[in-house]
Amino acid sequence: GQQLNQSPQSMFIQEGEDVSMNCTSSSIFNTWLWYKQDPGEGPVLLIALYKAGELTSNGRLTAQFGITRKDSFLNISASIPSDVGIYFCAGLPGGSARQLTFGSGTQLTVLP
Amino acid sequence: GAGVSQTPSNKVTEKGKYVELRCDPISGHTALYWYRQSLGQGPEFLIYFQGTGAADDSGLPNDRFFAVRPEGSVSTLKIQRTERGDSAVYLCASSLLSQETQYFGPGTRLLVL
C-alpha cells in the first residue's frame, strides 16, 4: 500500500543535539500526525497538526504542517537518551476517509 | 484511564491454521481501526469500524481476513488459512468519531511457521 516518503531513514546524533526529520506526499492531507514507537510497543501520538502552515510544539518537539499540505516536519531539540526510537509521520486525507497513511519511519539513535 | 489493549501479545501458529486477534478500545471511543505493520515499515490500514459496522474495509488484503465488532466495543480480527506472509504486528487503534487522532494499542505479534 501507499506510504509517505519519510527521511532520513535513520539518524545517529550526540546527546544534546537537535534533530529534524520530514515527510512528503504526492497527495494532499488535511491532518498530519507524528508518532513515536518503542520496540515491542504500539505507536504513541506526539503531535497532531490540523491546518496548513500550523506550527505546534510539545515540550522539546516542534512540528509543522506544510503550506502545500503535502509535507510536514518534526524537530526535536536538545536530544536526550529516551528520545531513542522510531518516529513515524502519518497523514489523514480528510472528509469521510479515516485511514491513516504512514511513512516508513526514522530510526533515531542518541549517543551519550 | 486505560488505553487500547490487545490480546494475545504474541501468537505463533502453523501455516494453514485459523487465528483470532482481539482488541479492546478506549472506553467511549466509537471508531476502531486495524492496521498491519511489517518489519521495518510503517503501519498499513486494514479496516475501520464506526460502531458495529465496518465503514471501510478496503485495506483487507484478501478474503482470508475478516473482522467483527458485534457490540460496538471489542473487535476481533480473524485470519483463516494463515500463510507465512501474514506474519506481522497487528495494531488496533481507537478514536472518538469526532476526532482525527487515533490511539494505538501495543499490538499482537503474529508469527506463522
Image (cartoon, coloured by chain):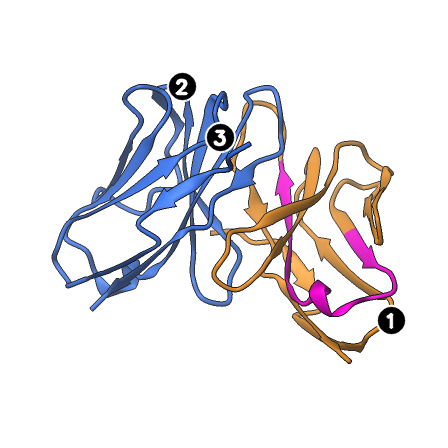
Give coordinates of residue A2: x percent, y percent: 52, 51
Which one of the lettered chains is coloured blue? Answer: B
Identify the magenta region. Answer: A73-92
Give coordinates of residue A51: x percent, y percent: 80, 32
Horizontal placement of A35 versus B51: left or right? right
Give coordinates of residue B92: x percent, y percent: 43, 41
**Residue B26 marker:** 3
Which one of the lettered chains is coloured orange? Answer: A
Q: Residue at x 52, y 64 (%)?
A: A39
On screen, residue A66 above or below B48: below
Q: Tell me the SS state at disc 2.
A: loop
Chain letter belonging to callout 3? B
Q: Tell me the SS state at disc 1.
A: loop
- The answer to whether tags 3 and 2 share a subunit is yes
Q: Residue at x 64, y 42 (%)?
A: A91
Please report whichever mark, 3 or 2, sits nearer to the chain's N-terminal start: 3
Q: Which residue is mark 2?
A: B51
Label 1 sits on what residue type?
A: Gly
**Quadrant including the C terminus of chain A:** bottom right
Q: Residue at x 12, y 55 (%)?
A: B17
